[in-house]
Amino acid sequence: MLPKNAVRNFQGSSSLADLFSLSDQTNAISFSGGYPDAALFPQEKLQQAFQQRLATAAPDLFQYRSVLGDLNLRKKLTNYIHQLNVECSVENIMFTQGGQQAIKLLASLFLNSGDGLAVEGPTYIGAVEAFNEYQPTYYEIPMESDGMDLDVLEEKLQHHQIKLIYTIPNFQNPTGYCMSIPKRKRLAKLAATYDALIIEDDPYRELRYAGESLPPIKAFDQTGNVALIGSFSKILSPALRTGWVIAAHSIISDLANLRLAFDCQSPNVVLEAIDQYLTDNCLSDHIQKLRNSYRQKLAVMLNCLQQYLPNECHFSKPQGGFFVWVTLPQDLDASKLLHLSQQVTFLPGKDMFVNSHPINHLRLNFTGTTLEEIQRGCQELGNLMKTALVTTPK
Amino acid sequence: MLPKNAVRNFQGSSSLADLFSLSDQTNAISFSGGYPDAALFPQEKLQQAFQQRLATAAPDLFQYRSVLGDLNLRKKLTNYIHQLNVECSVENIMFTQGGQQAIKLLASLFLNSGDGLAVEGPTYIGAVEAFNEYQPTYYEIPMESDGMDLDVLEEKLQHHQIKLIYTIPNFQNPTGYCMSIPKRKRLAKLAATYDALIIEDDPYRELRYAGESLPPIKAFDQTGNVALIGSFSKILSPALRTGWVIAAHSIISDLANLRLAFDCQSPNVVLEAIDQYLTDNCLSDHIQKLRNSYRQKLAVMLNCLQQYLPNECHFSKPQGGFFVWVTLPQDLDASKLLHLSQQVTFLPGKDMFVNSHPINHLRLNFTGTTLEEIQRGCQELGNLMKTALVTTPK
């Protein structure tokens, strides 16, 4: 017999695993994943970057190196971060295996069992899975169209010890909502007042298709109470598994020590190839291409949802990111809808709430499908909902 | 103010970090790290492999993919594993970010606070740091020149709940010792009898410079009670950050779910480039080169230790791996020796014991230095020891 799994990890399945397996279902149109459009990867230029850097690098490219990651790439990142009005030196940055690892390391560094953790309701399911191992006490802060409800958060902060506040301020996963500037300012202040650390997860920042870019919460952070996470996954390629965390030097230093026991460091080869790519190419131009394509996909999805969804169903109208959030009438169970569906997959929202688990939400991704698939998928979704509305008892 | 670190991770420094920083000290001869010789990396062939694979791959090379890692590379690995008399299909393998991540994931999957964990005394410090987060109850099993003392282990298994047994059977880090075949057989049986899982960490298997290769403990495992960890770090390049874990399907499946929340998956780009390298090159030929070089370095180190160390000091005589283990007279503190030393660095052994912490051991690495440095370093070490012996009160 084998020893039993840890109590912390006893569950037999993972919502993230379900998500990935839904995304791999090939005979249905998939709105379920969070995949970028593979047709838009700058494959040739990335290939040239690898070739160029590997051909010219010293042998120590293949040796163990800094746990923080390639210094030149950290320098380039500071230039970008300065444009966001965030103070940052190369000592404030650690590259991680995607943004996911940054979330995991921050959770591991700060969370004891029972520690207070505020998250948006709904929130990113992968973050919740990273947090769950540390058995925090969750506070679910309702999401509004201009970001989390800070009155609720403040009330919780007043009455409970809350150590971490996890938020996705731009084009939130799963709602697509952005946090307003006044809320960003107030949130930074609340964290300082109540000795909490904000984990600002910002993978979609550059994928804005309309409106003005908003400063990160970290730009309003006077006290080091914000850790800002970013990633190349959505703007370059997820297979590079390269994200970063920017935080006070003391936090980065502790994260780096912790990281050594997790996986030592990122693969230099990849970091240096990205550095080469950024030397030889204009990432902004590439991002502009992504924006043009995704803007069109989002517009088509919003039009089709307007056209095909029954009036009882509502949906968010994001200005960027990867997702649209659909709200069904209260009694309609999105999971049941998914099981009825043969031709389209999506992600029921229930597990994206850490406490309340309402059944009547679902998340749609629009970046990983073609325009034609978006149209067909939305039409199919509309039909499903109409049928369900007729058969669901009031 | 910032929230406090988790109790589990409150320490301000990391032994691993100290180790890496010792290794980076450039004005001294470093016997302290665990670095391969950078001059031996097959840089040109790795570069060709990246170039070839990136030039010919489909765009989904850059997309999210299987959490287990590239299927072709898993197939190649099964062929190698079969040669070791271990049954293994592609479903029994997950590629990880170096062997280090495999240790971390297994610890996370199985260990609750207080769970019993048997480790060799001394053992690999990076494993201990990975385990510490889960606050296990450690059982330190004395290391003998033919592997850990199984009588002591059996006695502990009889009287305590021990969930995991961590061992490095080949050229152990830090002693350089190998576990004998009878002990391997008995250990596999003990694990099955007492429902423990053996973590068999085997990064040095192929780096044997004399004697016959020994079957892994997993070859004697009838019950799925062994997880076997391997790595390309020492035989190809640590910067690729590519290791693997081989275990029962149920364990791999749980590890894969867990992995999604850690960092989603390995970078495909790297795994596919390794696959290309293995398609185009004979890894055995490369390993033969490593063996020839390291064999010579080891011989020089053992000769020099014989020549320069005072008779009161003893050292292991390994047949492979990266390390020689030195035992000083009982009262001589290796840490004090290190602080006296200007021209040579090494790793004091104290923190490599989870419970007993004897002060009179040190670990020497011989792969990361030149022959001339090995000679000079050993001479310096000998002088240090002789001086210390004169001044240390008996």
Image: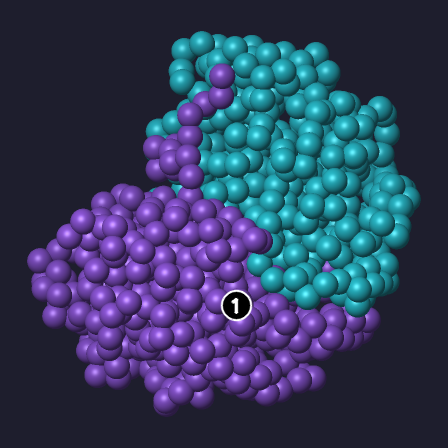
Chain colours: A cyan, B purple
Q: Nearer the viewer, residue B134 or A144?
A: B134
Up-down: is B199 above or below A146?
A: below
Instruction: Tell me the residue at 67%/37% (across/down).
Output: A90
Image x and y of residue B178, in percent: 31, 77
Number of callouts: 1
Up-down: is A72 above or below B35?
A: above
Instruction: Tell me the residue at 73%/75% (across/down).
Output: B44
Please, which chain is the residue tagged with disc 1 on?
A: B
Does B274 sit left or right of B263 as displayed?
Answer: right
Quarter where residue B211 is shown: bottom left
Instruction: Tell me the residue at 39%/56% (across/down).
Output: B347
Q: Nearer the viewer, residue A57 or A164?
A: A57
Instruction: Tell me the residue at 64%/48% (across/down).
Output: A69
Up-down: is A47 above or below A120?
A: below
Residue underneath mark 1: B373
Image quadrant containing the N terminus of chain A = bottom left
Quarter where residue B222 is shown: bottom left
Does A288 sit left or right of B335 as displayed?
Answer: right
Image x and y of residue A342, in percent: 65, 56
Q: Residues within 10 Å of mark 1 (few under 14, many from 20)?
A: some
Does B31 sit left or right of A209 as displayed?
Answer: left
Disc 1 marks a residue whose amino acid type is: Glu
In what element is the residue under mark 1?
helix
Does A173 sit left or right of B320 as displayed?
Answer: right
Image x and y of residue B365, in percent: 44, 66
Q: Say whether residue B354 is visible.
A: no
Image x and y of residue A110, in percent: 44, 32
Image quadrant containing the C terminus of chain A = top right
Q: Say whether residue B369 is visible.
A: yes
